[in-house]
Image (cartoon, grey):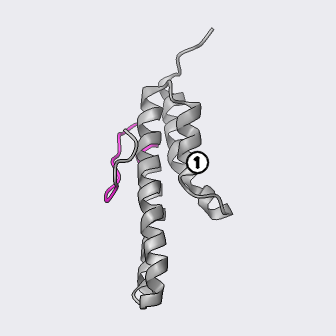
Amino acid sequence: MSVAPTATTSTNRATVSHLSALVGFVGIPSPVGPLVALLIWRDDPIVAAHAKEALNFNISWLIYAVASIISIFLVVGILLAPIVAMTWLVLVIVGSVKAANGEPYRYPLTMRFVS
């Protein structure tokens, strides 16, 4: 018998779906965390929406990070790579706070791969 998640449970899971991107700090690509959250909690529409947004964001920013690292050979990446990394971290935190407050959040500069 399945029990419908409460609003608090959905909010907590939505927050986790954003924060799960921080697995990037231990060497796992950052899109893996939101993908796992989406696969686990896909039946909850609130969590699924946040997990899809976080997944799209992390795929996009992984592409940006690779491009900035490659551009280190052109010297501009020396400045660009840290900016991309710090912006990613700040936006993950902002998305997590919005999810914790029960608000929808759309990340800026995000390509929509998963809908």
Determine which residue is flagged by label 1: 33
- Residue at (41%, 36%) from the top-left corner? 49
**Location of residue 27 (image quadrant):** bottom right
- Mark 1 belongs to which amino acid? Gly
Query: Going by the image, does 58 lie left or right of 26?
Result: left
Residue 39, image x and y in percent? 56, 34
Residue 1, image x and y in percent? 63, 8
Farthest residue, direction right:
26
Magenta segment boundaries in residue numbering: 97-110
Residue 28, image x and y in percent? 64, 58
Q: Secondary structure at mark 1?
A: helix
Query: Going by the image, does 29 lie left or right of 79?
Result: right
**Location of residue 110 (image quadrant):** bottom left
Residue 69, image x and y in percent? 49, 78
In this orientation, does residue 9 appear? yes
Query: Going by the image, does 37 lie left or right of 62?
Result: right
Label 1: few (<14), some or many (≥20) within 10 Å? Answer: many
The answer to whether 72 is drawn above or below residue 36 in the figure is below
- Residue at (56%, 39%) from the top-left corner? 37
Closest to the observer: 23 or 13?
23
Task: Judge whether residue 104 is colored magenta.
Answer: yes
Closest to the observer: 69 or 54?
69
The answer to whether 49 is drawn above or below residue 79 in the figure is above
**Quadrant in which the C terminus appears:** top left
Task: Judge whether residue 69 is colored magenta.
Answer: no
Q: Main secondary structure of the magenta part?
A: loop
The answer to whether 60 is drawn above or below residue 81 in the figure is above
